[in-house]
Image (cartoon, coloured by chain):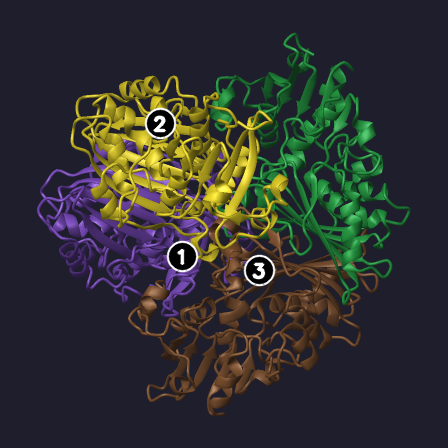
Chain colours: A green, B brown, C purple, D yellow
Amino acid sequence: MHMSGKVRVAVAGASGYAGGEMLRLLLGHPDVEIGALTGGSNAGEKLGVLQPHLVPLADRVLEATTPEILAGHDVVFLGLPHGQSAAIANALGDDTVVIDCGADFRLTDPGEWEKFYGGVHAGSWPYGLPELPGLRVQLQGAKRIAVPGCYPTISTLTLAPAVAAGLITPDVVVVAASGTSGAGKALKANLLGSEVMGNVSAYGVGGVHRHTPEITQNLSLLTDGEIKVSFTPLLVPMPRGILATCSAPIARKVTAEEAYEVYAAAYADEPFVTVLPQGMWPQTKSVLGSNSVHLQVTVDQTAGRLVAVGAIDNLAKGTGGAAVQCMNLALGLPESTGLTTIGLAP
Amino acid sequence: MHMSGKVRVAVAGASGYAGGEMLRLLLGHPDVEIGALTGGSNAGEKLGVLQPHLVPLADRVLEATTPEILAGHDVVFLGLPHGQSAAIANALGDDTVVIDCGADFRLTDPGEWEKFYGGVHAGSWPYGLPELPGLRVQLQGAKRIAVPGCYPTISTLTLAPAVAAGLITPDVVVVAASGTSGAGKALKANLLGSEVMGNVSAYGVGGVHRHTPEITQNLSLLTDGEIKVSFTPLLVPMPRGILATCSAPIARKVTAEEAYEVYAAAYADEPFVTVLPQGMWPQTKSVLGSNSVHLQVTVDQTAGRLVAVGAIDNLAKGTGGAAVQCMNLALGLPESTGLTTIGLAP
Amino acid sequence: MHMSGKVRVAVAGASGYAGGEMLRLLLGHPDVEIGALTGGSNAGEKLGVLQPHLVPLADRVLEATTPEILAGHDVVFLGLPHGQSAAIANALGDDTVVIDCGADFRLTDPGEWEKFYGGVHAGSWPYGLPELPGLRVQLQGAKRIAVPGCYPTISTLTLAPAVAAGLITPDVVVVAASGTSGAGKALKANLLGSEVMGNVSAYGVGGVHRHTPEITQNLSLLTDGEIKVSFTPLLVPMPRGILATCSAPIARKVTAEEAYEVYAAAYADEPFVTVLPQGMWPQTKSVLGSNSVHLQVTVDQTAGRLVAVGAIDNLAKGTGGAAVQCMNLALGLPESTGLTTIGLAP
Amino acid sequence: MHMSGKVRVAVAGASGYAGGEMLRLLLGHPDVEIGALTGGSNAGEKLGVLQPHLVPLADRVLEATTPEILAGHDVVFLGLPHGQSAAIANALGDDTVVIDCGADFRLTDPGEWEKFYGGVHAGSWPYGLPELPGLRVQLQGAKRIAVPGCYPTISTLTLAPAVAAGLITPDVVVVAASGTSGAGKALKANLLGSEVMGNVSAYGVGGVHRHTPEITQNLSLLTDGEIKVSFTPLLVPMPRGILATCSAPIARKVTAEEAYEVYAAAYADEPFVTVLPQGMWPQTKSVLGSNSVHLQVTVDQTAGRLVAVGAIDNLAKGTGGAAVQCMNLALGLPESTGLTTIGLAP
C-alpha cells in the first residue's frame, strides 16, 4: 500500500464505459487512491472532457497505456479491447494485483477460445464471480482476476441454484435484454441514439455470441450433467441494465414454493443478491448503479419448465462493480467496501 | 354500403390506444367513411382533446357505447375492455360486420377461457390471422371476427413454419419484449413514464399470461404433436413494438439454410410478412406503424435448437392493422387496402 | 412525366435519414415512380440492408451519386452533405426539378453564408416554406427549390403570425428541443444511444448554430423592424420531433385571446398547420411521421411576453415531407398529395 | 442525537419519488439512523414492494403520517402534497429539525402564494439554497427549512452570477426541460410511459407555473432592478434531470470571457457547483443521482443576450439531495456529508 495507507490503483482504458464506471466507484471507495489513468487514442486529453460526470478527476490527463505508466500501483484495472490485456499483465510483476474486465482470461478451454474469439488462448485467471460456489476462496489474495462478462454474470446467477439443486435438466434457454452501454463506446451506426430509441432488436442469435461458452463453463461447475445453453441477447432502448429470462425443463416434480426456497437458501448469505418477495419480478431500474442482483423464480407446471429472471446493472455488478468487489477480495478488504446494494430509481 | 359508395364504420372505444390506431388507419383507407365514435367515461368529450394526433377528427364528439349508437354501420370495430363485447355484438344484426379487438371470442376451449379469464365463455369467432394456413378463407365474407392478441400474432407467425414443417418438437420457449402501449391507457403506477423509461421488467411469468393458451391454440392447428408453450412477456422502454424470441428443440437434423428456406417458402405469398435476408435480424423500429411482420430464423447446432425472431408493431399488425386487414377480407376488398408494409424509421 | 404517366423521381443520399424519409413518403405518393437511388460510400449496397423499413425497395441497389445517374428524371431530390448540391444541380438541365434538402441554397446573403458555413456562396433558390406569406407562389412551377432547415421551419411558423401582425417586438428567443435524427447518421460519440438516452443537452449555444441566420432571414420577410434571434437548440432523447418554445416582448397591449385569433386567422387556410384548441399545448408525438405543424400561443402579462410553442416532425415536415410538398407545388399537383396530417401516436 | 450517536431521522411520504430519493441518500449518510417511514394510502405496506431499489429497507412497513409517529426524531423530512406540511410541522416541537420538500413555506409574499397556490399562506421558512449569497448562514442551525422547488433551484443558480454582477437586465427567459419524475407518482394519463416516450411537450406556459414566483423571489435578492421572469417548462422523455436554458439582454458590453470569469468566480468555493470548461455545455446525464450543478455561459453578441445553461438532477440537488445538504447545515455537519458530485453516466 501507499504511504498514505491507501491502496494505489491505476485504470487502463479510463475513457471507456467500463473504465468510467470503475472510476465512479473507486472515487467512493474509502481505501483507494487513484493513480495513473490511461487511454488509447485519447491519451493526452483531459478526463473532464471525456467523462464529465467524474467531477473530482476533471483535470486529470490521460496517459498512454504502457506497462511503464501502469507499474508501481497496488492494483491495475484493465478496461481494454480484447487481446490487449496479456501483454500488459505479463509486464507487471506479481506484487501488482491485475483485474481484467476484458475477455482474455475468462475461458479455460483453448478450443472454445479459438472458436469464439480466434487467435491464441492467453490462459485463464481466477474467475471473479464470488457468488458461484467455490470461487470466492480463489479470489481471496489472488494476484490476477478475470472479471466475468456481463451476460454470463446474470445468466449464471439466475440459473445456478436450480442447476446445483438438480431442479432442472441443464438444457437452458436464456434471453437477455441489455442496455446499449454493454456494446461500449464504439462508433457503430446501429448504436446511434436515433437507431436504438424506440427499438428492440436481437443480435448474435443462434449460439454465436461470445458469452455463450462462458455461461456453459460456469454452469458446468455445478453439475455433472451435460450443459446446453441457448443464448439470445437483445438490445433494448436504455443505457444500462440487463434482464435475463432463463428457463429449463424441470428434472423432477417441483413446486414454485420449493424452487423459491432453493433460491432463497442458495443466496441467503450473499451480500449483493436479493431474491425478491414471491410474486415480485425483477426490473433493471431497481439495481441501476448498484452492485445488486435481483432474482425471482417460479415453475410453469403446464410447460414443465422452471423460469427464473435476474437483473443487474451491466456496468456495475456486470463490470465495474464486480471489479471493485474482486479487488476487495484480493486485498482482504471487506467485500462490500465502496459498493452499494441500493439502485438509482426512478 | 353507404350511399357514398363507401363502407360506413363505427369504432367503439375510440379514446383508447386500439381505437386510436384503428382510426389512424381507417382515415387513410380509401373505401371507408367514419361514422359513430364511442367512449366509456370519455363520452361527451371531443376526440381532438383525447387523440390530438387524429387531426381530421378533432371536432368529433364521443358518444356512449350502446348498440343503438353503433347500429346502422356496415362495420363496427370494438376496442373494449374484456367482457363487454358479447352484449354489443349480440345486439347488432348479422348485416353488420363486427370486428372485436378484445379477447372475448378468441379462445375455442371454454376450459381455457375460464382458467385464464374467469367467468362464462362467450364462444368463439373466426380468428383474424389470415397468414395461418386455412384461416384466410374463414375470414372472407365473415360477419364476426376476433382479432388475435398482439403476443399470439407474432409468436405464432414466428414459429408456424417450423411447427408445420416438423422441424421442431413443439415444446417452445417464447420471450417477447413489448412496448408499453400493449398495456393500454390504464392508469397504473408501473406504467408511468418515470417507471418504464430506463427499465426492463418481466411480468406474467410462469405461464399465467392470458395470451399463453392463445399461442397454444394457434400452434395446435399446425401439428398433431403436443404443444407446450413457455411464454414470458417483458415490458421495455418504448411506446410500440414487440420482438418475440422463439426457440424449440430441433426434431431432426436441419441446417440454418434449410430452416431459412422453409420460412421463405411458407410466407412467399403473404403480403405483410418479410423474411429478412439471411444474417439480418428483426428490429421493431422497421415495422413501426406498419402492418409488416419481419422474421428471421437460424439453427443453433450446439444447443440443438431452432431459434426464430419476429417483430411487429403491437398496435398495428398486433391490433388495429389486423382489424383493418380483417375488414378488407370480410368485405371482399383487396387485403392490403389502407395498410402499408413500410415502417416509420428511425 | 414518364410513359407510365407517373413522375419519375431520383433520390441522392438514399441511405441517410433525409433520403430514407423522402422514400418512405414517395412510396405512398400515387403519382410517383421511384427511379435512381444513390449513395456515397454505400453505393453498391442493397437498400434493404441500409433501410430495412422500406420493404418495397429492399432489393434496390444504391448507385453512385453522379449527374449521369441522376439525369433523365422528372424530379431529383438531394439529401447530401452541405456543399455537394451545387455541382449536381448545375449538371442537371432545367427540365429537371431539383429539390435540395441541404443548406446550400437557403441563404440569400453571401455574408451570412460565409460567416456560418464558410466557403463560397452558391446562390439561393426559391425557399420551400409555402406557409410563409408570398412564398407559395414562388414554388408553383419552380425548377429549383431549397427545402428549409428543420429548426427554421418550426421557429418561423411559430413566430410568423405574431411578427406579421406586429404583436411583438421581433427580438425573439427560441429554445428548440430536437430528436437525434436531426443530427443525421453521423458516427459521433455524443450521438450514441448510451449518451443520448436519459439525457438532455444544449449545443450550438450563443448564436452560432447555422440555422440562426435562416430564422432571421425568414422573419425579415414579415416586418420592417430589426430582427434579433436568440436561438438555442437542445438534444433530447427521442429519435424524431422538434418542439420550439418561442417568445418575444409584446409590442402593444394584447390579450391571449387576441393573439390566439391572430394565429387562427393566419393559418386558417393552411392544410398542414393546426392551431390547437386554446389551452392545449403541442407535443411532438402528435405530429410524428406526419406533415402537420401544431401550434399554440398565449401572452404572459406579468413578463410582458408573447409565448408560442410549435411542434413538427423534423424528418417529415422538417425535411422529407416539406420536400414532397414542394414537389407537389412545383409540378402543379394538389399540395397535400402523398402527405398526411395524422401523426403516429402513442 | 440518538444514543447511537447517530442522527435519528423520519421521512414522511416515503413511498413517493422525493421520499424515495431522500432515503436513497440517507442510507449512505454515515451519521444518520433511519427511524419512522410514513405514507398516505400506502400506510401498512412494505417499502420493499413500493421502492424495490431500497434493498436495506425492504422489510420496513410504512406507518401513518401523523405527528405522533413523526415525533421523537432529530430530523423530520416532509415529502407531502402541498398544504399538508404546516399541520405536521406545527405539532412537532422546536427540538426537531423539520425539512419540507413541499412548497408550503417557500414564498415570502402571501399575495403570490394566494395567486399561484390558492388558500391561506402558511408563512415562510429559511430557504434551502445555500449557494445563493447570504442564505447559507440562515440555514446553519435552522430548525425549519423549506427546500426549493427543482426548477427554481437550477434557474436561480444558472442566472444568479449574471444578475448579481449586473451583466444583464433582469428580464429573463427560462425554458427548462425536465424528466418526468418532477411530476411525481401521480396517476395521470399524460405521464404514462406510452405518452411521454418519444415525446416532448410544453406545459404551464405563459407564466402560470407555480415555480415562476419562486424564481422571481430568488433573483430579487440579487438586484434592485425589476425582475421579470418568462418561464416555460418542458416535459422530456427521461425519468430524471433538468436542463435550464436561460437568457437575458446584456446590460452593458460584456464578452463571453468576462461572463465566464464572473461565473467561475461566483461559484469558486461552492462544493456542488461546477462551471464546465469553456465550450462544454451541460448535460443532465453528468449529474444523474448526484448533488452537482453543471453550468456554462456565453454571450450572443448579435442577439445582444447572455445565455447560460444549467443542469441538475431534479430529484437529487433538485429535492432530496438539497434536503440532505440542508440537514447537514442545520445540524452543523460538513455540508457535503452523504452527498456526491459524481453523476451516474452513461
Q: Amino acid at mark 3?
A: Ile
Residue at (83, 55) in percent of width and height: A168
B168 in relation to D295, above or below: below
- Secondary structure of residue under mark 2: strand
Separation (CA) of disc 1 from disc 2: 32 Å
Q: Position of residue C124 (x, y in %)?
A: 23, 43
Judged from this view, the residue extending furthest toward the right is A224
Query: Which chain hosts label 3?
Result: B
Separation (CA) of disc 3 from disc 1: 23 Å
Query: Which chain hosts label 2?
Result: D
- Residue wearing tag 2: D296
Quadrant in which the C terminus of chain C is drawn: bottom left
Nearest the viewer among C182 and A338 is: A338
Lower sequence index among marks 1 and 2: 1
- Left or right, A134 with respect to D77, comes to right
- Residue wearing tag 1: D190
Q: Residues within 10 Å of mark 3 (few under 14, many from 20)?
A: many
- Secondary structure of residue under mark 3: strand
Q: Residues within 10 Å of mark 1 (few under 14, many from 20)?
A: some
Nearest the viewer among C251 and C23 is: C251
